[in-house]
Image (spheres, rainbow, N blue to C red):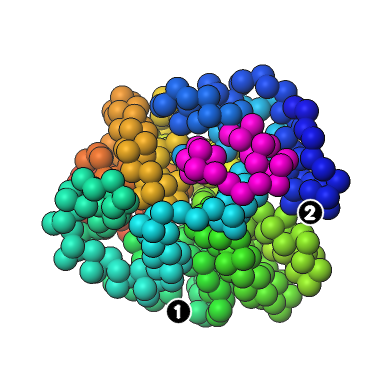
Amino acid sequence: MQTAFTPTALQNPDTAESASIIRKCVHCGFCTATCPTYVTLGNELDSPRGRIYLVKEMLENGRPADEKTVTHIDRCLSCLSCMTTCPSGVNYMHLVDHARAHIERTYKRPFADRMIREVLARVLPYPERFRWSLKLARLARPFADALAGVKPLKPLGAMLKLAPAHVPAASANDRPGLRAPAGAVQKRVALLRGCAQSVLDPGINEATVRLLNRLGVEIVLPKGEGCCGALTHHMGREEEALDFARRNVDVWAGEAERLELDAIVITASGCGTVIKDYGHMLRLDPAYAEKAARVSALAKDVTEFLSSLDLPLPANPVEAIVAYHSACSMQHGQKITQAPKVLLAQAGFTVRDVPEGHLCCGSAGTYNILQPEISAKLRDRKVANIERVKPDLIATGNIGCMTQIGSATGIPILHTIELLDWAFGGEKPEKLAGRDFRRVERKVAAE
């Protein structure tokens, strides 16, 4: 794509990078076939190609964002399916991240939108605040439909509908410290405790600690670690996101030096995509560029890390059909497609792919709050595709997807690690209480 950026504009390193990304686009349109918003809305400006035109015009002229550009950029899920499809290697992720930061700096949103985004940024990344907000949300839930009927307040209605009926108690794994295996230490990792996930479903990290400890992995839960920055990053609040990143880089780089970590294990794929990009996000910060690159290199999704270990054969595998939903941040962001399915099959489950598996479920961080109508259409399409394969269970690697899909189906949805922990010697997940699953007796051959 031809560009006409001025020499002055290109002095800004982010603008220079965006110009380079835009020039790689050859207008082929392959991205439109796999873009969830284009498939849903049919508007060229709601496709990656259309958004690239809008961003080009905005940045090329150095002008503030306008309502039209903001509308179509806001509708982007950042699912990154276009990057998987693109034959020209257009790094749409970095382009749209820059566009969002530019929008945040130059565009004044309507009052209600500003306030809702402020609340999300001030609550979701902080576990205690988030826990209390969920408890308050239960009291306000009867007003969800009324709020959803007022256009500027639709996100508040969506937020209340997504709030769980029960808020789990805080986990012991929220406290920093070492979690040592019973036997010899084979490997040592830091585990990202996370923010929203640790509140919504502490059982995910608990299952991770149990399974890794049984496999001889010592787990470090570092003091001072916080939100990865993904939530604020995708709202264009770049300085806040970079502050989160710097804090975590300081913590993890210090632990890696002190304890010689083999990996930083992440159980929320949305967080993993951003942490693996810390090296890029902090590339212009001379105090952090090198440290951030080292942290990004250590970051591993939990299934990615488990694939590097020698797992035992499960003594009594569970006889169940599992539909594997590959989160966008897993398959498109981190390019991890086979490891979770291989591990589930190795654990004894019958794994089925979901039709249209490349399309987003509509969760996408805060998207299901800020864009509830499009999100609901994508959720319903995803659930219909999952139910077509008639599974007993659904597995995925991202808490946002679990919340989104779980809100529209009666099929139990669990994190992949919860099923693996169960299959490889752990207890049956609490979510499956009252549901019977046959276990296959496997005879061990005499040596």
Q: Disc 2 to disc 1, how far (Cα)?
A: 42 Å
**Residue named by callout 1:** 175
- Amino acid, disc 1: Arg
The residue sitting at 36% across, 73% down in the picture is 129
Depth check: 188 or 191 in front? Answer: 191
Above or below — where is 437 with respect to 351? below
Numbered disc 2: secondary structure: loop
Image x and y of residue 275, in percent: 62, 58
- Magenta residue check for 303: no
Q: Is residue 237 visible?
A: yes
- Mark 2: amino acid: Asn
Specify the quadrant of the image occupied by residue 120. bottom left
Secondary structure found at label 1 = loop
Q: Is residue 290 left or right of residue 312?
A: right
Magenta region, mostly helix, strand or loop?
helix
Q: Quadrant of residue 110?
A: bottom left
Residue positioned most to the left: 142
The span picked out in magenta is 51-74
Q: Residue 284 in the image: x percent, y percent?
A: 78, 61
Instruction: Identify the residue at image location x=36%, y=68%.
Output: 130
Q: Is residue 35 left or right of residue 371?
A: right
Which of marks 1 and 2 precedes in the sequence?
A: 2
User: What is the total number of numbered labels drawn onto the structure image?
Assistant: 2
- Look at discs 2 and 1 and give the one toward the viewer: 2
Check the image and name the residue furthest to the right: 7
Query: In the rendered image, which residue does mark 2 sit on?
Result: 12
Q: In this rendering, is residue 150 above or below 386?
A: below
